[in-house]
Image: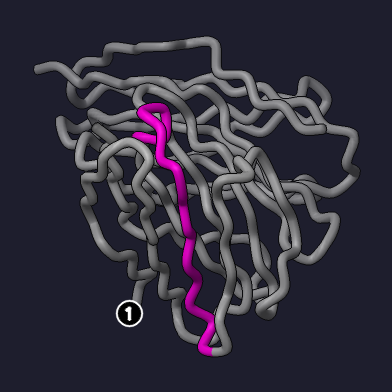
Amino acid sequence: AQKITQTQPGMFVQEKEAVTLDCTYDTSDQSYGLFWYKQPSSGEMIFLIYQGSYDEQNATEGRYSLNFQKARKSANLVISASQLGDSAMYFCAMRGYTGTASKLTFGTGTRLQVTL
Amino acid sequence: AAGVIQSPRHLIKEKRETATLKCYPIPRHDTVYWYQQGPGQDPQFLISFYEKMQSDKGSIPDRFSAQQFSDYHSELNMSSLELGDSALYFCASRTTGQSYEQYFGPGTRLTVT
């Protein structure tokens, strides 16, 4: 079984500052993937970034980077230079690589509010 | 680029009615997933299909059924609707040729009154 834990229900950050959203995971799979999704108030799920369990380097996508610490089983999302449009719910998710159609398991999410 | 299409985007039903949600995956994607997201909740996996066969099943009620058709579109059929079925229903698709990403549709917001 896979489990994702996001311990921050809500976070505030000032515009142009960096913010870290925490995510820890638990799995018995040797090979897995970790994802971050953004869900604005409009409801769609927007893929942000992916980290494979065997990737040696931390993933980066523009202003998003994933701080992957495999031994600690953490996959924190770092957003640099926050913008007002970053205000949304953020979900960490995990996918195993067993079977032909491995589902995503989500954490409970962190609601980020960017302030002026 | 083509995205996952879901219809309808919004649906209002009464208790005990039935509902059918449709999902059109990205062309050449062979795998479809359905997720249910209740108000203030994280998405929960319902069911998935690979090459038109059910491949995995999550917390899907017996009142729900789903299938994937020959053109790869999928339908989620929901009967005897309950108030607790009110949620955002996502469809996602991917191709096993890709390494990781599931592409989510915009979701269908179902309200049961």
Q: Quadrant of residue B15?
A: top left
Where is residue B105 drawn, in percent x and y?
37, 60
In the visual, does B75 lie left or right of B95? Answer: left
Q: Nearer the viewer, residue A113 or A102?
A: A102
Residue B32 horizontal/vertical position (percent): 57, 66
Q: Does residue B16 appear in this view? A: yes
Q: On the image, numbered disc 1 is attached to which residue?
A: B1
Does the magenta segment cover residue A104? no
> What's the residue at 58%, 74% (across, down)?
B68
* Category of crowding for the residue at label 1, using alpha-carbon neighbours closer than 10 angstroms: few (below 14), some (14–19), many (at least 20): few
Q: Secondary structure at mark 1?
A: loop
Query: Where is B75 relative to B1, above or below?
Result: above
Protein image colouring? one colour
Amino acid beneath label 1? Ala
Residue A33 located left or right of residue A11: right
Label 1 lies in what chain?
Answer: B
Is residue A19 visible in the rendered image? The answer is no
Image location (x, y in percent) of residue B53: 72, 73
**What quarter of the picture does the N terminus of chain B occupy?**
bottom left
Q: Is residue A85 left or right of residue A104?
A: left
Q: From the viewer's perspective, is residue B75 above or below residue A53? A: below
Q: In which quarter of the view is residue A92 placed?
A: top right
Percent x, y for residue A87?
23, 28
Q: Residue at x 45, y 21 (%)?
A: A20
Q: Which residues are magenta?
A: B71-86
